[in-house]
Amino acid sequence: MRSFTSMLVLGLAAISTALPSANVEKRELVSSETLISDIKGINDGVKALTADLKAYDGSLASEAPIAGDITAIHLANRKGYTDANLRVTKFSKTETKAIVDYTVQSVGVDIPNSVDVLKSKKPEFESKGMVPIILGGLKLLKYDHDSFSAALLAKTTGSQAEGTAVVKKIDDALQSGIDFYSS
């Protein structure tokens, strides 16, 4: 029995040395395309929100889609935040450029535009007592933006000037909406 146990231990030891080590190359589960898709999800929500804000007429039927849009943007943002934090390594310069370029031309344009439309609707929202809800939505989206941007910028490579500039542009737009609805 002892010799069987000894042979089993020796056999397992021999097999384990023949197996690949745990130091195999790590593969990223989150690619630059994943983050671009996440940003696209946010932008799609922003475009829907802008359209629903333009269509807002003070009726309950026109309020519901706005709440749904804010929720959709929030969820898309949290997905992006999670994906950015799941990224193990920094993005290459090429990947960083692709992410920043997409951000500049999508949410970098559409979020400030949406905030401008939102500001134009303040009288309608005031008359319906909706200002606290709009203000809460803006604060939520600003928090989402700040946390996702920080997580994503931490994974970029190379000059961060353009990325930081678009983050600031979006942050300034959201803050201007918060300030406008707070006054």
Image: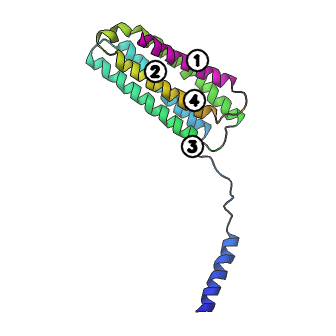
How crowded is the residue under tag 3: few (<14 C-alpha within 10 Å), some, or many (20+)?
Answer: few
Q: Amino acid at mark 3?
A: Leu
In the depicted structure, whether residue 46 falls above or below residue 25:
above
Looking at the rendering, the stretch of residues picked out in magenta corresponds to: 159-183
Q: CA distance from mark 3 to mark 4?
A: 14 Å
Which structural element holds mark 1?
A: helix
The majority secondary structure of the magenta stretch comes to helix
Dot 2 or dot 1, earlier in sequence: 2
Camera-side residue: 142 or 95? 142
Q: CA distance from mark 2 to mark 1?
A: 17 Å
- In the rendered image, the residue lying farthest to the front is 183
Q: Which residue is mark 4?
A: 149
Tell me where residue 157 appears, x and y as whole percent.
Answer: 70, 34
Residue drawn at x 58%, y 17% as measured from the top left: 169
Q: Are marks 3 and 2 in contact (CB under 8 Å)?
A: no
Q: Amino acid at mark 2?
A: Lys
Q: Which residue is mark 2?
A: 47
Tell me where residue 163 appears, x and y as whole percent.
Answer: 64, 25
Q: Residue 169: which numbered mark, if any?
A: 1
Q: Marks 3 and 2: which is nearer the front?
A: 3
Q: Marks 2 and 4: which is nearer the front?
A: 4
Q: Marks 2 and 1: which is nearer the front?
A: 1
